[in-house]
Structures are given as C-alpha cells and as structure tokens.
Amino acid sequence: MKYFITTLFTVLSFTVVAAVRSVVFDLPISDSADTEVSTNIVLKINASRLEQLSFSISFDSCDTNEVLVALGTDANADGDLSMDESDIVFGCDCGAWYRADLRTGESVAQESNILVIGKREFDPSWDLFKVVRRGAGDIGESVSLLEERIRFYICIR
C-alpha cells in the first residue's frame, strides 16, 4: 500500500492552461489583381506568464501566392513593422512553408502551417506582428494567434 501511494504522488500533476486567441480574417482588399496587402496587429503579451505563442496560418495557396507573419519591435514607433524591425518571419511561399530567425540568420523549411514560439525564444520587447499577403486573386487567408499561459499548477513528487 505504501508503494502505491508513493507511486501515485510521484506521477500526480495538475495543470490549468488559460489561452488568449486572436484571429485576423481577410486582409485589406488590394487595388490590383497581383499586389501586396498587409496589416499590423499590436502584440500585448505578459512575458512573465507566457508559456508559448502559437501562430496558425490558413489560406488558399497556389504557385504564385505568399502569406507571411513577421514578429518584432516597432523601433521607430510608426505603427508599421518593417523587415528591419522583424525578428521572426514565418509563412508560405508558392506552396512551401518556411520559418526564418532574422536575428541569427537561420532559415528552415516548416512541415506545417503552425509556428510555436516558446517562453525562452520570446522577446518581451516584441510589440507588433505583421501579416502580409502577396499574389493574385482572392486567397481567403486567416491567421490566428494563441497565447497560452499556466494559471494554476500543482506537481507532487
């Protein structure tokens, strides 16, 4: 009986995760058939409580379309995240998913439409993310951001 109780306490843990989800649907309509449109979204994250950020992109891809999400700090405070201010870029170009860390120069192919940024990778100075679409036609994109944080955690060993 003592062994059973010890084993039970060793593996018992309880977690309640709270999440905040933001969804960006339908970027602005472009003036021409083959152009670039974008929108900037304020990023307000309590870094001390963050466990991870998950970005999910959904859109109708083809050989000429691209959609990307850029994360960074709006250093000049103009409300527009430029590539010089971006730290992480994630998206799909001509049907191929990619992720680039512009701080390190590392670029990798992604296997899915989801980007996860953990607590250690997150930079508390990030204050904007930008969604950009390039290509022809109605792409029908949406981007969602899920911020997960642990509010209550019990672990008995």
Image (tube, rainbow, N blue to C red):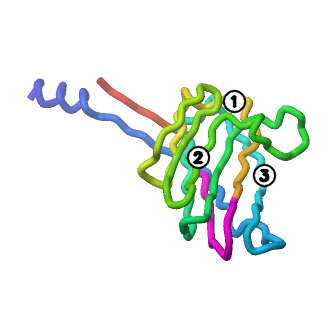
Task: Say whether marks 1 and 2 touch (CB < 8 Å).
Answer: no
Q: Give the Cα distance between marks 2 and 3.
A: 15 Å
Task: Say whether marks 2 and 3 touch (CB < 8 Å).
Answer: no
Q: Position of residue 7 (x, y in %)?
A: 17, 28
Q: Secondary structure at mark 2?
A: strand
Whether the magenta-drawn stretch holds residue 145 is answered as: yes
Q: Amino acid at mark 2?
A: Phe
Q: Give the Cα distance between marks 1 and 2.
A: 19 Å
Q: Residue at x 77, y 47 (%)?
A: 42
The C terminus, quarter of image = top left
In the rendered image, the vertical position of residue 111 relative to residue 45, given as above or below: below
Q: Which residue is mark 3?
A: 40
Q: Nearer the viewer, residue 152 or 46?
A: 46
Q: Position of residue 80 (x, y in %)?
A: 84, 46
Q: Which residue is mark 2?
A: 90
Q: Which residue is mark 1?
A: 124
Q: Quadrant of residue 46?
A: top right
The N terminus, quarter of image = top left
- Chief secondary structure of the magenta portion: strand
Q: Nearer the viewer, residue 147 or 103?
A: 103
What residue span does the magenta drawing correspond to? Answer: 133-150
Q: Nearer the viewer, mark 1 or mark 2?
A: 2
Q: Give the Cα distance between marks 1 and 3.
A: 18 Å
Q: Position of residue 5 (x, y in %)?
A: 17, 29
Q: Nearer the viewer, mark 1 or mark 3?
A: 3
Q: Residues within 10 Å of mark 3 (few under 14, many from 20)?
A: some
Of the numbered discs in the image, which one, if any, rests on residue 59?
Answer: none
Q: Secondary structure at mark 3?
A: strand
